[in-house]
Amino acid sequence: MLHFLVALSAFASPIGCILYVRSMLRGKAKPNRVTWFLWALAPLIAFSASVSQGATWSTLSIFMSGFSPLLVFGASFFVKNAYWKVTPLDYFCGFLSLFALALWAATQDAFYAVLFAVLADFLAGVPTFIKAYWHPESEADSSFIGGLISSSFGLLAVQEWHFVEYGFPLYLAVACLAFIVLIRFRGHKLKI
């Protein structure tokens, strides 16, 4: 059963991001490159920290939650007009996000790595959250639905309830749910 949950978890996130890229190709979704790059970086660090502490298969969903945004970030360079204009706020949040990741590097402690990865991911998402609030038509909820499914199955696969193993998937589930609610209930749901 555990391996089945992990497999479901691992594939939900990239499927959601592939649908997001499809929305980009249709000229609907316009990702913020700073956010999507940092959304890739923070989970990959959390994944590394979890594995270094002996975390189990449940961390595969964390890896995929980092790999999947790389798909969107990469596609934004190939799809004409499929990116959001970066503002000083984006750079500021990006800097704070990178600073949080640097704090992890300084501690070399798995608990703090996951904590700072969550903080970094949150700070990286602030510009996109603001964009989704003011311009929900520029976002697609598919990647967030995939992320919610992925992180939820990842949580079900947790074998030991230690923050290092459940912290990031729990944060991702809450963050993805917040984005879905925002995009859908601002009245501008995109069709995928």
Image: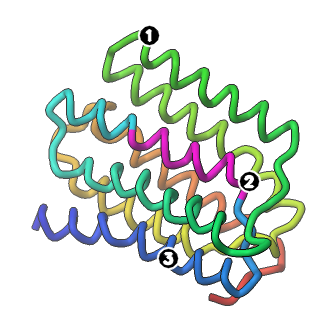
Q: Is residue 85 above or below residue 53?
A: below
Label whose residue precedes the other's in the sequence (3 or 1): 3
- The location of residue 85, given as percent across then percent down, is 85, 55
Give the CA distance from mark 3 to mark 1: 35 Å
Label placed on residue 106: 1
Is 24 in front, or is 119? 24
Give the CA distance from mark 3 to mark 2: 18 Å
**Can you tell which quarter of the image residue 64 is in?**
bottom left
Q: Residues within 10 Å of mark 2 (few under 14, many from 20)?
A: many
Q: Which residues are magenta?
A: 32-44
- The location of residue 48, given as percent across then percent down, is 29, 35
Is 163 in front, or is 18? 18
Question: Which amino acid type is marked by label 2?
Answer: Thr
Q: Is residue 101 above or below residue 131?
A: above
- The location of residue 173, given as percent across then percent down, is 48, 55
Kindly check if marks 2 and 1 are in contact, taking CB atoms under 8 A apart as contact: no
Task: Provide the secondary structure element on which disc 3 rests.
Answer: helix
Label whose residue precedes the other's in the sequence (3 or 2): 3
In the drawing, does residue 12 fall left or right of residue 77?
A: left
Kindly check if marks 3 and 1 are in contact, taking CB atoms under 8 A apart as contact: no
**Can you tell which quarter of the image residue 95 is in?**
top right
Task: Say which quadrant the C terminus sits in.
Answer: bottom right
In the drawing, does residue 77 fall left or right of residue 171?
A: right
Residue positioned 64% across, 58% down in the render: 178
Residue positioned 51% across, 25% down in the render: 101
Question: Which amino acid type is marked by label 3?
Answer: Ile
Label placed on residue 40: none
Label placed on residue 128: 2
Q: Residues within 10 Å of mark 3 (few under 14, many from 20)?
A: some
Mark 3 sits on what residue? 18
In reply to whether residue 35 is colored magenta, the answer given is: yes
Task: Provide the secondary structure element on which disc 2 rests.
Answer: helix
